[in-house]
Image (cartoon, rainbow, N blue to C red):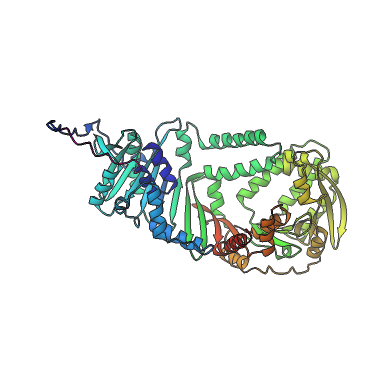
Amino acid sequence: MIEPVRRGVVLLCLLAAACAGTAPPPKTPAAAAPGAVAKAPAGPSVGPPVTLLPPATARPFQMATVSVGSFERLLANGVKLVGSAVPIPMTADGLRDMLLSEAGLAPEVAANLDLASPCGAAVVALDEKGRSGVVLAIPARGPAEAEKLIAALGKPVMTSGPLTMLANGAGKSQGWVYRAGAVVVIGDEVDAMARGTMLALEARHPSADDATTTIYPEAIARAHGTDVKSAIAAFLEQMRQMQTAQTAVMTPDSYYETFGTLLGLVGDAERVEIGLALDPARGLILKARLMARPGTTLEAAAREVRPFEIDRAVLGGAGAPLMIGATSIGTVWKQIMGHYRDRLAADKTKAAAAALAYYDAYLAGMVGGGQSGMVAITKESPYLTGAFSTPLKDAATAAKVGGALGRMDTAATSALLRAQLGNAAAMLDWTSKRETVGKAKAIRFRVTIKKDSAIDSAAVRKWIGSGFDLYQAVAGTRVVVTFGRDARARLAAIASGKAAAPVKSASFTEAETGAKGRDGFYYFDLAPVLGLVGTLGASPRLAAIARGGSGPIPLVFTAGGDGAGKTWTMDLTLPLTAFTSIGALVTAGAMNQ
């Protein structure tokens, strides 16, 4: 039963039990020849006794657990949510029966399962070389039904204390089983059952989420003979090597630094809970809750509560909004920006001194209000346009930052870009010059793809054209960056104090209101991307779908602490609006086949 059980984890515990049941029951023996003396069937052998560790004792081996409050509720909510996008000729009961049939459980056997009750799973370490075992706790309708389910899984061949080894009719697949009242616990290995049975039973609990996976970073690292910090460093290095081997496109050093900082938060967590909720009224919601260990960066980040603020000046402009968002500048982002400064300080070129002076003034002048921005897609190349804003402390601070920016020349701006882009800067060419834009003294960058570089291709040039403009300036008491086709006009409007047009999107307004009090908020609309891909692509069907258009396809991300230093959370939501819009696209695609 080893592989079927492992596959079952992917189906959130219940189907794991069903997969374990794919082994057919023992075949009925052929009738004995006339006159033959029937032998009494041999009972299961008796193995060494096994002690099931209590949860407190087994905790150091616990790498992860999975909890599903109700598989019936999970299926019902999933069918309703998908049905809001595309009418499907299937009910939750029909989907349940299909899945159980695919798993090999006959209807009369599946009838013994209690799909409305919680089920659980535990992944436990078996040694320090990466070996692990999976144990599943599946509820039946009662003790008698649990026995029927066990009988359907295989024939008893050995007992070891409270455990029983089962084998299928051919004896080629074996696994262990334990019954706790009406709950059947199954696993591949006896050691895993000893360590994980009580943990899997403990994982059976109701939850606000439809399914919750809990990860224990330290236990996972220990099970692989390392520690969390070393494991993260090794993982990032492996990513670098894979990227280098697979593509000539250089990933910016800043990407690995930022990703490493975020992974460091996971390493600071005592445990990480990832919840999945399928809400027919709200959509699909993923929630990551990081439980902080005392004295860590994660604890400091969780203690800070700095609600995001979107500078309305960045809104408006040309194009359809692709992203609108803001984040406060707290512990995590200060670390990430510190990486940029360290790289700039290590640059020994003469021009780097002016760049460092500007960046230091910029960092010192920032306030907790954070950064906000908007990116949009236009109908002409370069297709991306947008604006970002960072508030400064006061007018005196703004004058100091503006003065440092005014002393930047092309060589200094090159040093600043190298510090932020790292090795990826080698793929770009740029020029810079000072310009007066409305009331602002700005630096204009002209960015182009370096000829014969790794990203010099017809597809990339199709997207960005011959290049794009980027402006950076101090406007009032904020640092503003604009880019794209209307970069100059956007900067002039912001510098003049002209009010930006409000975003006419009910889904954005709802998402922003719902994120109130969070440290970070980002609203993405995938519809403009699909429309542009359909327009630029060679597929007539995609082009027809793009012409038909659709409503917004929002994806909403929020993050923030609890103010007590205990929990830092990240939420990713695909609202109901996204499902209905996707349904419209699917319908349009079907009509254009």
Of residues 197 and 576, which is closer to you in this image?
576
Percent coordinates x, y for residue 106 in the rendering: 32, 49
Q: In this figure, what is the number of numbered marks?
A: 0
Q: Quadrant of residue 554?
A: bottom right
Of residues 431 and 498, which is closer to you in this image?
431
**Residue at image x 39%, y 43%?**
122
Left or right for 22, reference 146: right
**Residue at image x 70%, y 43%?**
340
Left or right for 459, reference 219: right
Image quadrant for the N terminus? top left
Percent coordinates x, y for residue 237 in the rendering: 61, 34
Percent coordinates x, y for residue 576 in the rendering: 54, 64
Q: Say if the magenta span includes residue 23.
A: yes
Q: Quadrant of residue 91?
A: bottom left
Find the magenta span and give its range. Answer: 21-33
Left or right for 405, reference 99: right
Q: Say if the magenta span includes residue 344.
A: no
Q: Is residue 233 above or below residue 284?
A: above
Q: Is residue 371 among the parts visible in the rendering? A: no
Q: Quadrant of residue 534?
A: bottom right
Percent coordinates x, y for residue 75 in the rendering: 43, 57
**Residue at image x 45%, y 49%?**
213
User: Magenta region's main secondary structure?
Assistant: loop
Image quadrant for the C terminus? bottom right
Of residues 286 and 158, which is closer to you in this image?
158
Q: Is residue 283 among the parts visible in the rendering? A: yes
